[in-house]
Image (spheres, grey):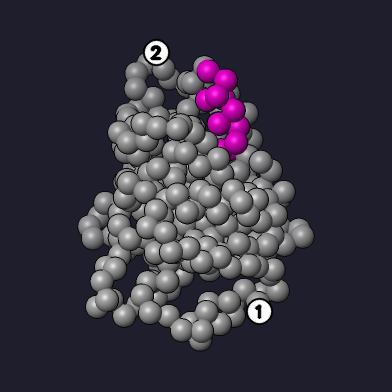
């Protein structure tokens, strides 16, 4: 979908967290649309990542907490509604609520990671693999100002679904770069000389400066993670290809697990 036509953004808020990074990003993202996109805020606890015992004081929230949650959205002049869900099926509640609210884009907060690897649980993998909507995963402490966008493509893919996904990734990358006045970089991994993509053709088709085209030998997970780190990418755009099952163990999982900035998945 054309990002300009995304008139409702679905934002996941975990009430057990002190700061709501996805909501902060959603306010900025909504403001880039004309007219401004509305927000549908789902308040739900990710039980897999959260201490749900009575000892966790963050599970108790007052009306003042709700007013403080809504305040920055109201101050930005953005229309919004709020939905609460008590289901233990966090993944299922996001899928159901995003569909019933007719949203176009999902913003998801990531928890603080216990190590250098990205903390992504089974529920999040399910969401990334089965959601019909783009999903932006917002990291704790992510910079509000985007300076560098990295779009990961696979121009060797001959099937139509890969070509279509490449087009969507590039279109989204160019749109984000324009809105944030950021640099757009394209990365394409290849495994051997037989699968080497035409670098000049890639530059022509994407309209990106050749200095920002990175064709690198290696596995996608190694190449994309390395380029994202070297460029200090604020957001990396990757494709997942929608599936109804078998969401674990694929290339996109290996890539996402090693990225440091925000991550936008398209399928």
Q: Residue at x 42, y 59 (%)?
A: 87
Residue 184 placement, left or right of 227 = right
Query: Where residue 47 is drawn, which disc sits there?
Result: none
Q: Earlier in the sequence, mark 2 or mark 1?
A: 1
Is label 2 in a helix, a strand or a loop?
helix
Front-most of 237 and 93? 93
Vertical placement of residue 168 versus 48, above or below: above
Residue range corresponding to the magenta coloring: 159-170
Q: Residue at x 51, y 84 (%)?
A: 63
Q: Give the residue drawn at x 60%, y 62%.
A: 40
Q: Is residue 67 above or below residue 154?
A: below
- The x and y percentages for residue 86 are 43, 64
Query: Mark 2 — residue?
Result: 194
Residue beneath label 1, please? 75
Most distant residue in the bottom direction: 64
Mark 1: give few (<14), some (14-19) or many (20+) Cα within 10 Å.
Answer: few
Please name the residue shown 41% across and 55% down the image.
90
Query: In this figure, what is the number of numbered marks?
Result: 2
Q: Is residue 236 magenta?
A: no
Which quadrant holds residue 244? top left
């Amino acid at each position: 979908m054309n990002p300009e036509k995304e008139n409702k953004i679905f934002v996941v808020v975990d009430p057990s967290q002190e700061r709501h990074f996805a909501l902060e990003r959603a306010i900025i993202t909504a403001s880039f649309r004309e007219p401004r996109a509305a927000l549908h805020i789902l308040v739900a606890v990710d039980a897999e990542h959260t201490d749900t015992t009575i000892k966790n004081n963050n599970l108790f929230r007052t009306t003042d907490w709700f007013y403080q949650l809504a305040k920055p959205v109201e101050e930005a002049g953005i229309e919004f509604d709020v939905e609460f869900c008590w289901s233990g099926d966090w993944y299922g509640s996001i899928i159901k609520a995003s569909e019933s609210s007719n949203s176009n884009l999902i913003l998801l907060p990531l928890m603080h990671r216990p190590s250098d690897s990205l903390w992504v649980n089974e529920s999040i993998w399910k969401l990334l693999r089965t959601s019909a909507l783009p999903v932006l995963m917002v990291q704790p402490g992510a910079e509000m100002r985007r300076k560098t966008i990295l779009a990961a493509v696979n121009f060797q893919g001959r099937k139509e679904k890969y070509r279509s996904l490449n087009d969507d990734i590039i279109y989204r990358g160019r749109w984000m770069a324009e809105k944030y006045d950021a640099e757009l970089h394209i990365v394409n991994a290849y495994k051997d000389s037989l699968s080497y993509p035409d670098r000049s053709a890639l530059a022509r088709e994407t309209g990106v400066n050749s200095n920002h085209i990175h064709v690198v030998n290696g596995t996608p997970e190694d190449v994309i993670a390395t380029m994202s780190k070297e460029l200090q990418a604020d957001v990396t755009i990757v494709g997942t290809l929608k599936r109804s099952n078998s969401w674990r163990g694929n290339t996109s999982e290996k890539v996402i697990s090693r990225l440091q900035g925000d991550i936008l998945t398209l399928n």
